[in-house]
Amino acid sequence: MRVAVSLSLCWLWAAGLSLPRLRLSYRELLASNRSVLFFGHRGSLGLRCLYLDEYRDRLFLGGKDVLYSLLLDGATAGAKEIYWPPRPGQTEECLQKGKDPGTDCANYVRVLHPYNRTHLLACGTGAFHPMCTFIYVGHRGEHTFSLDAASVESGRGRCPHEPSRAFASTQLGVFAGGELYAGLTADFLGRDPGVFRSMGTRSALRTEVDQRLLHDPKFVAAHLIPDNDDRDNDKAYFFFTEKVVEADSREHAIVSRVGRVCVNDAGGQRVLVNKWSTFNKARLVCSVPGPDGIDTYFDELEDVFLLRTKDRKNPEIYALFSTVSHVFRGSAVCVYRMADIREVFNGPFAHRESPHHQWAAYEGRVPYPRPGVCPSKTTNQPRRQYGTTKDFPDEVLHFARAHPLMFQPVLPRHRRPLLVKTDLPQRLRQLVVDRVEAEDGQHDILFLGTDAGSVLKVVVTQKTNSAVTEEVILEELQVFKMPVPITQMEISVKRQTLYVGSSLGVAQVRLHQCESYGTACAECCLARDPYCAWDGTACTHYQPSGKRRQRRQDGRHANPAHQCLDQNLTVPQDGLTCTALAHRGAYGLSMWAPSPAHLRDQGMPQEKVGAAWAGALGEKGMKPHSSQEGLAPGGGR
């Protein structure tokens, strides 16, 4: 189905309305074959985790008492299933402890990580008795999927007890140690939060039970990021929110944090035995500067996405935040550089004399080796050799225990959010990013999952010689029929596909469908979609290696008068620079300028279409036009 589009009024965008260029309903996505859905073989998937394996071309899903393996070609008929319920007696014990039989007393699979060339690590809640096992997935090219019941063991410290409690984990491959790093609450009552290391060849570690380290945290993401070429300096980073204990009454009740530990941490010999000795944390700030020097903070961290670069040591950190207050509700995306994060962790420690004092930068002597650094060649000095954290002096470990917080916060790139939305009816929950090469340079395209079963596709462009950005909502995709929260999202740049998960199931959605924007050069250019370009005959997927002479694309300025002069569009040079696209159907606006496609539909000769369209966009020539004319088939929800 081709979705007809039309041009809308420039001043609607100037007024700040967040109107998507295209809105595609659940039915339209299916009818156009842009979306393929999988709901499992048992009616309801109860999805809790998703692992995209592009090496094997497979998608692995963890749900309620079940795991699935799907091939990435979109054919769900060949999906393989493993039924993995709680162990005998666990369901009954869960019910006896007062838990809900429908939502709690099952085995919700919450961990899926690659372990070696042939196996995945899987962990589930086990009806409030966490358990882990290995899943045999075979070699590349094989579609095998089996669970070894004999390998099932306790998952405490690896997987949360509850199906929905916030949780984050990451794992080193078996050839790099095989350890699992997890941030979770490790007890039945949810009162024992910590950062844990388990499995592998190194000793098991966890954070101390101390509110100075973690105060009612909500873990969001965990990633392994190397500091430099010395593997002994590798660190695991955790992104979470926690309650603050600052004495300043103006401080928010919740703040976002980034914490880190050394991968080669072994704990202390006499102090911090079997506990992390290198744990530090810093505040992660995402705020809008105010005119009076008072910032508006977005403190609820929702999701984190690492945009990998050619330098594996320096991925760009994209973080989605939200805020809900009596003043307003909104969401923001901030971007952080690893250099700025490392600078904060290498800066002053926070210190205060008592809970009633204000935080200040610690100005006393910091022991050597500096707390938080990893034992490595860069740490050692001729007469001070530290092969392990167990060799660190006790004063280093005492200082680390008393000063886990850094004084300076981590600020976003350009000191402001990349994107701010305060006028959306939905709450943004998930984030993935694609950096796209276009005719006019690079563009970041953000895919934002909402709590209403939809995904927003947003392009963010940097204004010339300025830190100011402009964002355009290109599409709103109603991926699921029911308004369920999006809980999982993964992106395959290689396959140009988005994988979207909710409790109902998972959807495979193409990143673009350029023909939806229209059949004219101007329509394609006005879309401002970096994925799309006019190739001389149609609006198609932009290929950087294609013939440059035929391509027409203008993501920054949306000026078809400049791009389409040789495509029978006779408009003034400055005639079209600010226009928006909207549906010519159930999603149409009450006032709109007719698109070239609409003018052709009304019988206007092609040679007159361009001039008539340009005239319709003039401020004085704009007239009300019924949004019900030219309804696209199936345009309603």
Image (cartoon, rainbow, N blue to C red):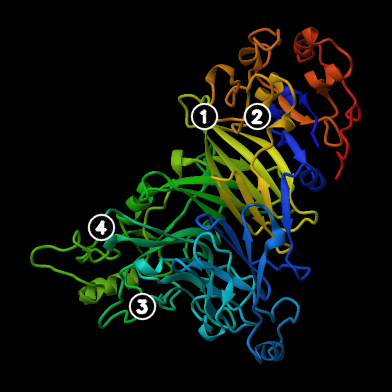
Amino acid type, callout 3 = Lys
Q: Name the residue under label 1.
A: 544
**Residue at 67% across, 35% down:** 474
Give the number of the mark in front: 4 or 3.
Answer: 4
Amino acid type, callout 4 = Asp
Classify 382 as above or below 450.
Answer: below
Callout 4: SS: loop
Amino acid type, callout 2 = Thr
Q: In this view, does 449 lie to the left or right of 287?
A: right
Classify 323 as above or below 202.
Answer: above
Q: Distance between the residues labelled 2 and 1?
A: 12 Å
Residue 230's tag is: 4
**Residue at 63% across, 28% down:** 528
Q: How crowded is mark 3: few (under 14 residues within 10 Å), some or many (20 or more)?
A: many
**Residue at 77% across, 25% down:** 8
Residue 540's tag is: 2
Residue 275's tag is: 3
